[in-house]
Image (spheres, rainbow, N blue to C red):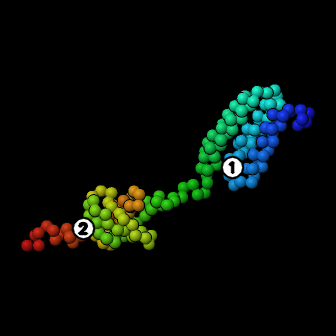
Amino acid sequence: MGLASLGMEGSYWLVAGLALLIGELALPSFFFVFFGVGAFVTGVASYLGVEDLTTQLVIFALLSSLLVLASRTIFSRYLLRKSPGADVKMNADALIGQVGTVLVPFEGELPGRVRLQGLDFTASFASPGVAGEGARVRVVKVEGIRLVVEVLDPQIQTSDAGAASDGSGGA
């Protein structure tokens, strides 16, 4: 009972499975192994009497697809949840919660400039307000390239422009 007793189709499936598994070793991904297993199982099915090529192709396609889908579930549920970097925030998400300083004052809907981690960003308030130069703000979300912030320093929240615009002049 050697490879010759499998018939040509069974041999092709086993060779294809072996080639896919070798290809998996040569590539940095973890993808071809599922098709290699599907080809091996199809070769065994051919050996056990499944001679129709259409049925063999269906077995290969279904098994390979199920293995790919199951691997996604297995990896995300069991292997990646305890990954040491799973909860590390990257890119724009890392800015949320960070505290910056107002460089260019902004009022209401008009954007201002905020320095955060040594970089200047365009920013607007989460709710309408005023912040003068030097006010400390916290990033609550990122919208495209603009930060949405809230004021942390209420004593610097109003600027001199607000006092001068009321027209009373202190009299």
Across and down, in percent, residue 44 comes to 80, 33
Count of marks, rendered view: 2
Q: Residues within 10 Å of mark 1 (few under 14, many from 20)?
A: few
The residue located at (57%, 54%) in the rendering is 86
Which quarter of the picture shows residue 135?
bottom left
In front of the other: 12 or 23 = 12
Across and down, in percent, residue 35 comes to 71, 41
Across and down, in percent, residue 40 comes to 78, 38
The residue located at (17%, 69%) in the rendering is 163
Q: Is residue 136 visible?
A: no
Identify the amino acid type marked 1.
Phe
Q: From the viewer's perspective, is residue 120 above or below residue 92?
A: below
Q: Earlier in the sequence, mark 1 or mark 2?
A: 1
Q: What whole-number distance in Å separates the C-alpha atoms at marks 1 and 2?
A: 57 Å
Looking at the image, the residue that sits furthest to the right is 1
In front of the other: 131 or 47 = 47
Residue 30's tag is 1
Q: Is residue 70 left or right of residue 109?
A: right
Q: Are marks 1 and 2 in contact (CB under 8 Å)?
A: no
Q: Is residue 145 left or right of residue 110?
A: right
Residue 135's tag is none
Q: Is residue 128 left or right of residue 117?
A: left
Across and down, in percent, residue 23 comes to 75, 50
The residue carrying mark 2 is 158
Q: Secondary structure at mark 1?
A: loop
Q: From the viewer's perspective, is residue 13 above or below residue 79?
A: above
